[in-house]
Amino acid sequence: MGSLGEEDLEKLVIDYIESPIIVVSDDVEKSSRALITLQEILVTQGQKEKEIEEKIKSFIKRRRLFYEGDDEKRDVMKKIVSKLRSDGYDASISKTSWDSSFDRREGCRVFRCSRKYEYINIMVTSDRDSDDVSDARRVIVDLDFKCQFELAKQTKGYKDVTEMLPTLFVATEERLKRVVSLVCGEMKNSMKEEGMPRPPWRSTRYMQAKWMSDNRRRASASKRESWFVLEEGDSDGNKTTCCLPIF
């Protein structure tokens, strides 16, 4: 390749000086890092998680299952649990219940709420094929995971994050905690940027309680129940009651 002449060199210098300078803001960089981290968490599945997810997706597609409303959703969950149990899985519908107390230190008025949420819970042993109950761990299946993080008003960065979330989410407690923590952090940033106050039920602690509250029980009985904390005086309704108005 020949050397550049003086005119060519001068043209390159002028083009460089006149070319626009692209500045990447800190918000864009943070959003990109969040997307990359979220993608890494979502694709890092254990063998049991992959196996369960494939079975559920195949079953839903084959049976053409769909639902509208909580009652129909629970019927679909019952069918999925029945299928998983017939395949040898220790599966059940799990109901969590938790009391949330917030005070002015968290930026809101004092109130207490009693909340309930249902999802599919599966107890699996490690890949060492151990039958020891103490060696079992939870795999959580949520049919509406993505919907739990929807906002009426959101930034593009947060929209990109939520669009990456699956509707059907199958994960261990550890992986679920990481996803919820990351997404709630992005939710907080989005609401702050949009000038919206973050209500307490959008906090990481509150969101994680949907799947990992200490008060949870099986809605369908099973022989193995040692890991459950049974809730006293629980009802079958999915109602939310607040002692004081939130706003």
Image (cartoon, rainbow, N blue to C red):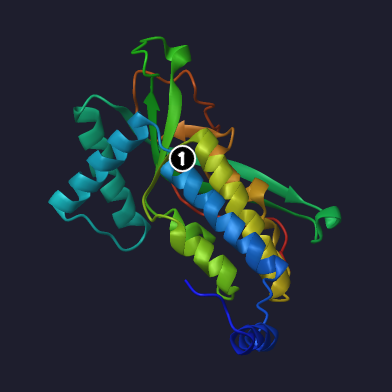
Q: Position of residue 197 (x, y in %)?
A: 73, 69
133 lies left or right of 151: left
Count of all numbered marks drawn on residues in the image: 1
171 lies left or right of 100: left
Mark 1 crowdedness (10 Å alpha carbons): few <14, some 14-19, many ≥20: many
Quarter of the view holding residue 7: bottom right
Residue beneath the point at 58% across and 61% down: 32
Q: Position of residue 232 (x, y in %)?
A: 55, 32
Q: Position of residue 25 (x, y in %)?
A: 70, 71
Instruction: Let me know if residue 51 appears in the view.
Output: yes
Instruction: Let me know if residue 115 appears in the view.
Output: no
Element on which disc 1 rests: strand
237 lies left or right of 193: left
Please determine whether, in this image, residue 50 is positioned above or below residue 143. Answer: above
**Quadrant location of the C terminus?**
bottom right
Please determine whether, in this image, residue 72 is positioned above or below residue 118. Answer: below
Quarter of the view holding residue 89: top left
Camera-side residue: 218 or 36?
A: 36
Q: Which residue is mark 1?
A: 95
Please determine whether, in this image, residue 245 is positioned above or below residue 57. Answer: below
Camera-side residue: 26 or 76?
A: 26
Quarter of the view holding residue 242: bottom right
Q: Farthest residue in the right direction? A: 105
Please determine whether, in this image, residue 78 is positioned above or below residue 128. Answer: below
Residue beneath the point at 66% across and 55% down: 185
Residue beneath the point at 52% across and 51% down: 38
What is the three-letter code of the residue carrying label 1?
Answer: Lys
Residue beneath the point at 51% across and 41% down: 176
